[in-house]
Image (spheres, grey):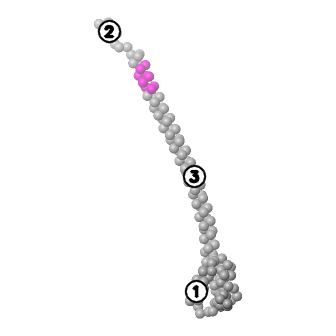
Amino acid sequence: MKTVKQIADEAGVNVQTVYRRLNSVKQKSNAILTEKVGGITYFTEVGEKIIVECLTPVKQMLNGDKAENAEILFLREQIKALNAQIEKLTETINIQAQSINAAHQNELAETIIDGKNIALIEDGNKKKRRSFWQFWKK
């Protein structure tokens, strides 16, 4: 005969879970599942088999939760890494955009300067046409 604590340890659950399952099984069946000896609750052989069968899905669920938690933690780390990559790429894009804007502004400035220089050259090359009677004007 095993105690409630021993069954809980074997099943990988806490003692309260064993007691809860025991109470629900006792309500459903009239079989004698436990015996008290000196204030300690022991399972009968029938009770041990029944309670272990009831606790197997709980143990599987807990093990599944651990695997899911590990997967969740892994995915969270992946998300952090991807967010860091996104931040770096965003910074790079912003720097490139600033560089492109600066180059474009320089190009526009050069075009404006070239346009003024061409206009000045053209103005310098043009001679004012004067009539022959205005030869005294400069």
Q: Is the residue marked by circle 2 packed among few (<14), some (14-19), or many (20+) residues within 10 Å?
A: few
Q: Which residue is mark 2?
A: 137
Q: Is residue 97 left or right of residue 65?
A: left
Residue 1 percent coordinates (x, y): 70, 88
**In this rendering, does residue 46 appear at all?**
no
Q: Which residue is mark 1?
A: 23
Mark with earlier residue (3, 1): 1
Report the residue that reaches farthest toward the front. 38
How many labels sit on residues? Answer: 3
Residue type at mark 3 is Ala
| Viewer-side label of 2, 1 | 1
Residue 117 percent coordinates (x, y): 44, 22
| Viewer-side label of 2, 3 | 3
Quarter in which the C terminus is drawn: top left
Q: Give the magenta-colored segment's residue range.
A: 113-121
Mark with earlier residue (2, 1): 1
Q: Is residue 131 above or below residue 33?
A: above
For residue 3, the mark is none
Q: CA distance from mark 2 to mark 3?
A: 75 Å
Residue type at mark 1 is Asn
